[in-house]
Image (cartoon, rainbow, N blue to C red):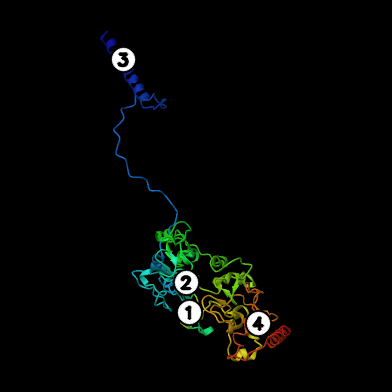
Amino acid sequence: MKKLNLMLAIVLILIGIVALSGCTARETVTGQVGPAGPPGVMGPTGTRGETGPPATALTFSAEYTGSRICGGCHADISATFKDTGHAWGLSPVENGLRPNYPFTQVFVPPDGYTWDDISYVVGGYNWKARFVDQQGYLITHAPDAAGDVEYLNQYNFANPYASQRASWVGYHAGEAELAFDCGTCHTTGYSPKGNQDDQPGFIGTWSEPGIQCEACHGPGSLHAKNPEGFQMRVDRDAEACGECHTRGTVEEVDAEAGFIQHHEQYEELFQSKHIALDCVLCHDPHTGVVQLRQRDQQTTRTQCEDCHFQEARFQKNERHAEINFDCVECHMPRLVQSASANLDLFTGDIRTHEMAIDPYQINQFNEDGTLAASQISLDYACRHCHVEGMVKPLSDQELFDAAVNYHSREQSSR
């Protein structure tokens, strides 16, 4: 009986061990995650924190910075550009001190005024100067003599090519309150809205006087902050220069008193095959022409013979070759007047950009003298030399015969 009980106890113990082993094995198996239960009750709202600073707007709108900032990186270009006429299109008079120009100087303002009365000088570089009073009006009369049509208010520099000395002349003399509305082509960052310096005579506002870097390249603040990320605009099209170097419609070349008027280079180019070229192919806008001439350096990037090599190689006029005439003496005569000119010498103070000569045309202008022909006439191609007191003068018939004969020989030799 004891043995039976002992055996029964052992069997029960073994059954328990087996049962426990089975339970342990089942607990180690991981089942699938069941569905999420319902959300709990939302807790109480916390107290409101302090208001943060306003967000910074993300903008890609560039602003004008001024040529001084440009010169910080582009020192070499800035140094030569400061000696071009563009930089001196409009110059401020500060603390009663006259502007200090690179090559020419305006020592006194118009009669009756001191430098304290002048706010800006228009021009003053190489050709002429006009003056703006403290209210933004161009000076046209003496302080107490409004209406004086003989008042001399524009200063012209000497023009040795036309045998003209420096002199004062009248510009809209006697006209009352002549507003300065030239900002489009004499300032940088111009806007027609408002009045510069809050003065009534100034039409529009600007960021910087004169034609500075950003007038052609656009506002540079983004480029100054990130030069590689924001490239500056470079427009080499002649039409870009023509925005200022034009006077009226491009199909006509305006004239007055025997000369083409200044700022018409684009209209002149428009008359010829050269309109297909960009101005910067010949001109470096960062050096101009006058400073190169002053330094006895080549005034253009390219020469006429670079393209017209046949004409240069077979120059038939022995006399012209003997005196070492440049192409421009005949093909770009001083047919344009900016300041002074001499009609007796057929000479203004700026070379024309028409270039082609018509050997069958004596006169340059239409009947009333308001428009120039599209080609250079013999009057201006030849008579700035062939006049009394210089080279042998030629009558109209002699001039015509010489030009036609020369042109015929040249055509037959080609």
Q: Is residue 390 left or right of residue 127?
A: right
Mark 4 or 3, closer to the camera: 4
Element marked by disc 4: helix
Mark 2 or 1, closer to the camera: 2
Q: Which mark is residue 345?
A: none
On-image quarter of the C terminus: bottom right
Residues 74 and 101: in front is 101
Asked if disc 3 and disc 1 are in contact, CB closer than 8 Å, the reply is no
Mark 3 or 1, closer to the camera: 1
Which residue is identified by label 4?
Answer: 378
Q: Which mark is residue 292?
A: 1
Q: Earlier in the sequence, mark 2 or mark 1?
A: 2
Q: Position of residue 160 (x, y in %)?
A: 50, 84
101 up-or-down from 14: above or below: below
Q: Cα distance, mark 4 to mark 1? A: 29 Å
Q: Amino acid at mark 3?
A: Leu
Element marked by disc 3: helix
* Residue 64 visible somewhere in the drawing: no
Which residue is identified by label 2?
Answer: 148
Q: Residues within 10 Å of mark 2 (few under 14, many from 20)?
A: some
Asked if disc 2 and disc 4 are in contact, CB closer than 8 Å, the reply is no
Q: Which mark is residue 12?
A: 3
Q: Position of residue 36 (x, y in %)?
A: 40, 26
Q: What residue is drawn where x is 29% and y is 39%? A: 50
Q: Earlier in the sequence, mark 2 or mark 4?
A: 2
Q: Earlier in the sequence, mark 3 or mark 1?
A: 3
Element marked by disc 1: helix
Q: Cα distance, mark 4 to mark 3? A: 139 Å
Residue 398 picture quarter: bottom right
Q: Cα distance, mark 2 to mark 1? A: 40 Å
Q: Position of residue 334 (x, y in %)?
A: 57, 80
109 up-or-down from 229: above or below: below
